[in-house]
Image (cartoon, rainbow, N blue to C red):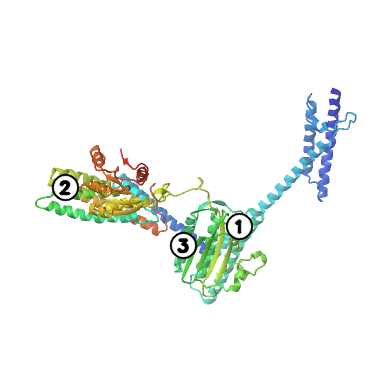
Amino acid sequence: YSLPDLQEFVRASKAAMDVVSQLQGQFLDFTTSLYNEGFLDDQFVQLQKLQDESNPDFVIEVVSLFFEDSEKLLNNLATALQQHIVDYKQVDALVHQFKGSSSSIGAQRVKNACVAFRNYCEEKNVEGCVRCLQLVKHEYNLVKSRLDTLFKLEQQILAAGGSVPMIA
Amino acid sequence: MTKWWVQSAAAAAASAASAAAAATAASVGCAQMHGQELQPKQKPLAAAAAAAGAAAAAAPAARTGYNPLEEFFEADRNPDEDKPVAYGICSSLLFRVLNVALDLARREAETAVRARNDFLAVMNHEMGTPMHAIIAVSSLLQETELTPEQRLMVETILKSSNLLATLINDVLDLSRLEDGSLQLDIGTFNLHALFKEGLNLIKPIASVKKLLITLSLASDLPEYAVGDEKRLMQTLLNVVGNAVKFSKDGSISLSAFVAKSESLRDPRVPDVFPVKDSGSGINPQDIPKLFTKFAQGQSLATKNSDGPSWTCNLFVNLMEGHIRIESEGLGKGSTAIFVVKLGIPERSNELKLSFVPKGPANHGQTNFLGLKVLVMDDNGVSRSITNGLLVHLGCDVMTVSSEDECLRAITQEHQVVFMDICISGVDGYEIAVRIHEMFSKCHERPLIVALTGNTDRVTKEHCLRVGMDGVILKPVSVDKMRIVLSELLEHRVLFEA
């Protein structure tokens, strides 16, 4: 086994390891900020615990499902609130769904916005509802872009040959 | 009596002195027996020992009423004889002197060996540094524009330097072997991770050569093993490295599995690691030559340039295994197989896990394995999460999204039905009544559990009224679900406070 090959290995591995630890650091910092800023709560941690060798893409699958679902719900809500006579029961049912799904993946701020939304539904306050819809949409977009970034960081770490640190 | 004591004391002192002389004489005699003069250092030592012995002999006798040398006199005491028994003292003194001499010789020898090894290590470093420089620069030179003659010259330089570098390393290892300090560093390590790491180290070079490397670990390959992790890695890298080196294109597959042991009682398990390459292949006649030690006078040409290094072979032997290479001939690739014996760690606390351990699916609760469960939830996201959660705990899960589906799907085999009653606008309670009706004639009705975001008294009473067996507050963590399932199965009821 020749020395230049070995030296090349060592150099390449060291460089790779540096890249990996840098990415892992970024990942950890970013994740921490998500929890600190209330975008995610403990339920997201629980989701990650369900990911293992037999189910290696669980989190990204569930989150993708959440994104799909949410887009539909937001569209339906917009349509429902544009009706001449608003069917508050339907609006409430939609918001209830949204609250359920966001809470089950740990999207805390979205869930809280949904709770406020439901109050306006009960009061049959259309302006309140419209404002809430904007808020919910805004929070949803914020968490979506952050989750996309999180997954990208994970992919980068894996591509660099490292492993994604788990939050204990 | 006193007279006797005084007499013996005097005699003892006298004999001690003569014993000392005798001891010194004896050690001189011993030394001379081995053909050496008593070393100058040893003379005062012997004398000192003798003097100490004498002092020790004399001192107790000075104390009234107590004489530890009594025992020497006891058996042989003959009041008529005034010749004391001095051989006892003499032999113990002699032993002490000889021990000191031996100890000294041993320490000198150890120092000599250490000195030699230090010398070799220093020389290794001193020789290695310029060697590495030669190799590095020659490699760089190879990458430049060269005439064919120049290229040949550079290749010669490189080949020779590589051989020399290997030789330097082998000499160092050889010396370590001779003084027995080449020992395996045994510890518990993650076997799966070792292979993955090894693969990651090889990948850069393999990808440059456009070689595909695959790794397959047998399912019965234990995750943790006891052995010398570093040396196993070295061996692995060496063998795989050779495969990479001699393959121009194609693929290399590395697999690891547990070999069947002749003796089932043998707690240490031989692991087999075949490395197949699609390289240039080896002439079968050359194979036996690949492993013989350089010390046996192999010619440099066939020495170790084509096969696993000598040290690698040595490590494998230390791990009570062996390496062999099989090839179907030139052009057909070859398979290097190395077998090592590793230990299996006991389920012990000394496992050092440097990462967050991912709980296995049935952490402590194997009675959930195959538990048939039905989940009813009309929210897709929450349904797939509850599904993932129960699957993670080992259950056999079916999911439905509506009451009708639930009633169609439910059977006697289902042990638990989880229903999400956060469903707005749907009376999730009605279904519990229907389930009771369905199973009124059977003894084995599935347990019905409500998952709800609200466990106030009203909700709970309602659940009880419709015949639910349990109510759980969402969100449910993995640990909570585990507890819930065991409570349910044990007590057949669970109402969360």
Residue A154 at what x, y percent from top left?
A: 36, 55
* Amino acid type indicated by mark 2: Arg
* Residue linked to disc 2: A131
> Is residue B105 found left or right of B412 in the rendered image?
right
Q: Chain of mark 1?
A: B
Residue with the most extreme bottom position:
B148
Disc assigned to residue A144: none
Task: Determine the CA span between mark 3 and mark 1.
Answer: 25 Å
* Residue B60 visible here: yes
Question: In this view of the protein, which residue sits in the foreground, A152 or B116?
Answer: A152
Which residue is depicted at the point 64% across and 70% down? B299
Answer with left or right where residue A7 lies relative to residue B177: left
Residue B20 placement (x, y as % from top left): 82, 37
The chain ID associated with circle 3 is B
Q: Which residue is mark 3?
A: B216
Alpha carbon of mark 2 to alpha carbon of mark 1: how far?
75 Å
Q: Which residue is mark 1?
A: B318
- Callout 3: helix, strand or loop? strand
